[in-house]
Image (cartoon, grey):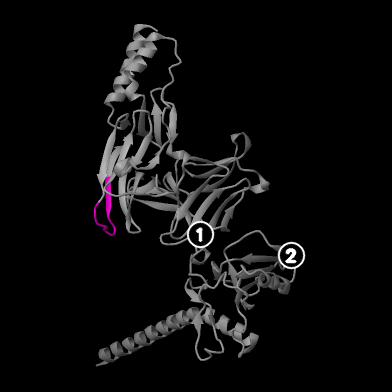
Amino acid sequence: MNLFSFIFLLLICFNYASSGSDIHIGYQFMVVVPVDYRVGFTGRAFLIESNETAPNFKVALSVEAIDEKYSCSLQVFLGDVKVWDSGHETRFYTTEKCLIELTQDGDLRLTGPEDRMGWKTGTSGQGVEDDKSSLMIILCFLLCFNLKQRLQILRTGNLVLVDSLESIKWQSFNFPTDVMLWGQRLDVATRLTSYQSNSSFFYSFEIENKGIAMYLNTGELRYSYWEFKPSMNRNITFVKLGSRGLDLFGDNYKKIAQIPSLKGSPPLRFLALKNETGNFGLYYYSSEKAKFEASFQALNSTCDLPIACRPYGICTFSNACSCIRLLTKKNKGSSDCIEDISGGFCDGKEAEMLELENVGSVLKDDPTVVNISREACEDLCLQDCKCAAALYFRNASNGVQECYLYRLVQGLKQVEEGTGFSYMVKVPKGTGENDGPHNLKKWVFILVGAIDGLIILLIVGGVGYWMIRKKRNITLRSEVTTS
């Protein structure tokens, strides 16, 4: 190695040591955790940021009040939007302090009191290898030893831990959360996940061999509610978010499909899976409004969302929720909404199926059985104590009959008459016995559309009242003019 090369390496070492946008070996920072729990509390310290003009990326150490405890995590923000969180899958709850440290052996970690470990990159001992023969190189590496690994944020928003040869030892892009950033790539069998607050439900946006799909998950249950497949049954290898849409690639890195952004909109910055609705969208930054706006959303109707209404609720044509109500022997004069009784028939309790007219479901799964009758589909659910509902579909064009079984009653929506759907809910046997099956089904159907009817009545009444007032005002003005 010549003297110039040695000086060049020393300059690199000096640059690493003097950079203000990196975190180096030995770095520590702490955020104090309050003694008493404070609802809505957020303590946040920004550690490093990218050099782009706003909105740029910032890395923060955060303490947040969640579920009457304090969560400690490392987070990445694009402007004011959180795009990555170390505690996305598993939260680290702590007291007294939240400490981040890049240890001498190259491990980035979060700890609490008494050095209790909450999260780490697992990069201990992955620094520069001393396999060079040149004494000057070894000397330079020794001079740079304490700087051989550092944490930095790239212009793509990828948070990386690199060594002095720029080799990436760990990166946040390998641990996707609920956001996919511009330039980020997701391979087949990876997914984004989004968790509902105070709920056992969570959503997933999954890259599969034959397409992209969104799922509603709870426990071992998993139902799809949206999908996109390339034409000609082509296989996907990976997807990547570009400036103009989500690009799907097949073999040999060939683009085979795209979910495009709105034509003429600014370049995309991220894709996000929303934690409350389960919808996903493509977002750009509006300089005029100084905020991020959606250029594309997968689901544009409230009733297409998986949890538009509570369990045993039906989303109507007016995007309002109507619950399933029943008349019983003991309660013949009034009606109550059905509560969540799914899974309540495994103790020997007898049941029957209640058919809901003009009701379907946005939740999908592979058909349990095909080419069977509606009655046979009904019996399949009755024989399975964990079955809560069944959806029977007959395709009028080809005559194919499909039966779907569900262990939860969720995602119901009103559909047009004659679409071939028949949705059946399992209820305790004898429900509505005094009124007969026909009257029971009619009662349920009427109540499903009750909110729609009320809304229409209010609209018609309002228009009529407005017309009467307008006519009256014209008459009064005419009388005043005549006087």
* CA neighbours of label 2 inside 10 A, class few (<14), some (14 to 19), many (20+): few
Residue ID at (36%, 17%): 141
Highlighted range, magenta: 34-44
Residue ID at (53%, 58%): 219
In the rendered image, which quarter is residue 373 located in? bottom right
**Residue 37 is inside the magenta segment:** yes
Label 2 vs label 1, nearer the camera: 2
Instruction: Report the disc number at residue 159.
Output: none
CB under 8 Å between discs 2 and 1: no
The residue where tag 2 is placed is 400
The answer to whether 352 is drawn above or below residue 33 in the figure is below
Q: Is residue 54 visible?
A: no
Residue closest to the eye, 216 or 243: 216
* CA neighbours of label 1 inside 10 A, class few (<14), some (14 to 19), many (20+): some
Whether residue 350 sits left or right of residue 124 in the image: it is right
Q: Where residue 464 sits in the image (x, y, percent)?
A: 41, 85
Whether residue 79 sits left or right of residue 249 in the image: it is left
Whether residue 98 sits left or right of residue 230 in the image: it is left
Instruction: Report the disc number at residue 299.
Output: 1
